[in-house]
Amino acid sequence: MKAVLDIPDSSFLALFNMEDLVEIFCLNSGVEKPDVICLPIIDEGGAQFDSAYTSRANNMWSRYSVEKEIQNIRKKYPETKVYFSIEPTLPGIKASHLTCRDQYGAEREGVCIVNPYAQKTILDIVIEASRRFNPDGIILDTVDLHGQRSTGEGKPVDITCFCNYCKQGMQDLKFQSDLLSKRVSPLNLVLKATATGIRPLSPTPNSQFTPDQLVDFAIKEGFISEDDDQTLGWAQTIINYVRVRAKVTGSALGEICQGIKTEFPSMHVGAILNSEDFDWTGGLDLQSLAGQVDEAWLDINDLTPATVPPNIDIMAYAADRARYRIDAFFEVASDRRFLEGRLRTDTLENIVVILQERASGLEHVQNLDKTFVRSLQTMIYVHGFVGIPFSKKFSQQIITSIRDELVSILSNIQQKPSTVSKDIVRKYIATLVSFREEGNELNRREIVGLAAQMDLID
Ligand SMILES: [Zn+2]
């Protein structure tokens, strides 16, 4: 049984010793040593090395050295392999020709892996990191490739990605993506904006679903009150979309994996999923990874031997959308730009409250114990397990450290006046005016989006 110690964010390495993390992992799982240690090379805070595309400067936790950590692992645990985890949406890289778009065409966070230019960028970065640090494997975190957003409870939900490449890919599979871009949309059957975020219908529809079944679930779970003339048509649209989306995103992921294999034929390549089902924020299911990756990390709770595609090693990973919650915490906790921007408009104590709220989502992360590991021995379709050396104490320590960092950032901000020049403000106003004159609607999203793009706000 392969034992993988996963370090999901560089804060772990900035604040704790590798030896301590290994010890916690071994104590929890009952193994003598990990077979693999997976280090975050691009995480929610950005890259951990400088290159033509990336800079470490925005990462809150750039005080540890990737080189030294790898040397340390290879010296202390010579039989242990080193993998790198990569967040393929490339946090910290802002390039409008690469980013995701929602169903209305508005630009959104993160690059879209379906875009061939984004694939090239991701590959360049992975290849450079691999040449420099020589890892044994690359793991792509796919749990949040296609972000969602709502503007409040009961409001419509924006989903991604509907960039030109995604639209073309869906059209090639005979799906008209504009079916989802109406304000009163088929998405109402399966996604609902609540006060605490977007709630998906449970279970997630798959291609075995009939439209009747989907409508029944949507009524039972309160997504719609009753069916009418259009709901069966909506249900069919959603069932088609889920199938097509998973195919488009799965083959894009395959392109990246193939690119890595072409450059490094013996490199082990894997992906992190939430579960085997289609996932709205990942845009993938386990079946769509068939033939694309060597291994998949996922919650195996509902997995059965029949649903395991051939030639993929299944690795049991943290339960209950845990990786998504981990990423949601660190997308705040590790992004220096975000924290600095927030400090300009909010109090330090309020930011700590946000961090505490996100940290509360991490309570389900630690599912690794000896009983769990022993139970896996009986499952012949499970190849190994992945554990995170995490405890509540860790997240509190991370928050305390961020608080200290924020105090020092705050004193810098107070000393340094804003450096926005009058020229940039003039250019911003001129751009808004010409955008309006071209007949576009100028709403809050466009105004704020352009200001962020021109670095007027964070
Ligand atoms: Zn796209």
Image (cartoon, rainbow, N blue to C red):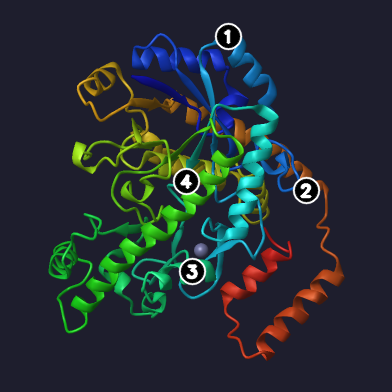
The residue located at (81%, 57%) in the rendering is 418
295 vs 90, nearest the viewer = 295
Circle 3: residue type: Asp
Q: Image quarter for residue 63?
A: top right
Q: Residues within 10 Å of mark 3 (few under 14, many from 20)?
A: many
Measure the C-alpha gap from mark 3 to mark 2: 37 Å
The residue located at (69%, 91%) in the rendering is 437
Identify the mark at residue 102; answer none if there is no mark: 3
Residue at mark 2: 414
Report the mark closest to the observer, 2 or 4.
4
Q: Position of residue 305 (x, y in %)?
A: 20, 36
Circle 2: residue type: Gln
Measure the C-alpha gap from mark 3 to mark 1: 47 Å
Q: Earlier in the sequence, mark 1 or mark 4?
A: 1
Residue at mark 1: 76
Q: Earlier in the sequence, mark 2 or mark 4?
A: 4
Circle 4: residue type: Ala
Residue at mark 4: 328
Residue 261 sits above or below residue 344 on the image: above
Whether residues under marks 3 and 1 lie with C-beta atoms below 8 angstroms apart, the answer is no
For the question of whether residue 38 can be seen, the reply is yes
Q: Is mark 1 within 8 Å of ligand 1?
A: no
Circle 1: residue type: Lys
In this rendering, position of residue 40 left or right of residue 371: right
Q: How many marks?
A: 4
Determine the secondary structure under disc 1: helix
Measure the C-alpha gap from mark 1 to mark 2: 45 Å
Determine the secondary structure under disc 2: helix
Q: Position of residue 91 (x, y in %)?
A: 60, 49
